[in-house]
Image (tube, rainbow, N blue to C red):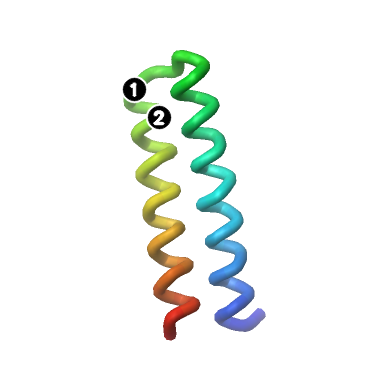
């Protein structure tokens, strides 16, 4: 796998986690769970951006 493949995979994970956080927030999940999903989405999104930039 190349670096671009890892960046694309991280972007897909980030998108899936954003969707999960939105549905969890709307569904009334615990605040800590939604924050965890949102934080992981931000981390994977940042990783994806760094990998695409380099």
Residue at the spot 43% in from the left edge and 81% down from the top edge: 53
Residue that carries the numbered disc 2 in the rendered image: 34
Q: Secondary structure at mark 2?
A: helix
Residue 33 percent coordinates (x, y) = 40, 28
Residue at the spot 45% in from the left edge and 18% down from the top edge: 29
Q: Secondary structure at mark 1?
A: helix
| Nearer to me, 17 or 1 | 17
| Mark 2 closeness class: few <14, some 14–19, many ≥20 residues within 10 Å | many
* Residues under numbered marks 1 and 2 in contact, where contact means CB atoms less than 8 Å apart: yes
Residue that carries the numbered disc 1 in the rendered image: 31
- Residue 32: image quadrant is top left
Residue at the spot 34% in from the left edge and 22% down from the top edge: 31
Residue lying farthest to the top in this orientation: 28
Checking the image for residue 12, the label placed there is none
Quarter placement of the N terminus: bottom right
Residue 18 percent coordinates (x, y) = 50, 42
Residue 14 versus residue 37 in the image, above or below: below
Quarter placement of the C terminus: bottom left
Residue 22 versus residue 2 in the image, above or below: above
Q: Is residue 14 left or right of residue 30?
A: right
Residue 19 versus residue 27 in the image, above or below: below
Mark 1 vs mark 2, CA separation in Å: 5 Å
Labels in figure, total? 2
Q: Is residue 36 left or right of residue 20?
A: left
Residue 11 percent coordinates (x, y) = 55, 60
Residue at the spot 59% in from the left edge and 78% down from the top edge: 4
Residue lying farthest to the right in this orientation: 1
| Mark 1 closeness class: few <14, some 14–19, many ≥20 residues within 10 Å | few
Residue 19 percent coordinates (x, y) = 55, 38
């Amino acid at each position: 796998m190349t670096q671009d493949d890892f960046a694309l995979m991280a972007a897909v994970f980030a998108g899936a986690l954003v969707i999960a956080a939105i549905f969890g927030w709307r569904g009334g999940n615990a605040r800590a769970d939604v924050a965890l999903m949102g934080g992981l989405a931000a981390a994977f999104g940042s990783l994806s951006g760094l990998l695409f930039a380099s």
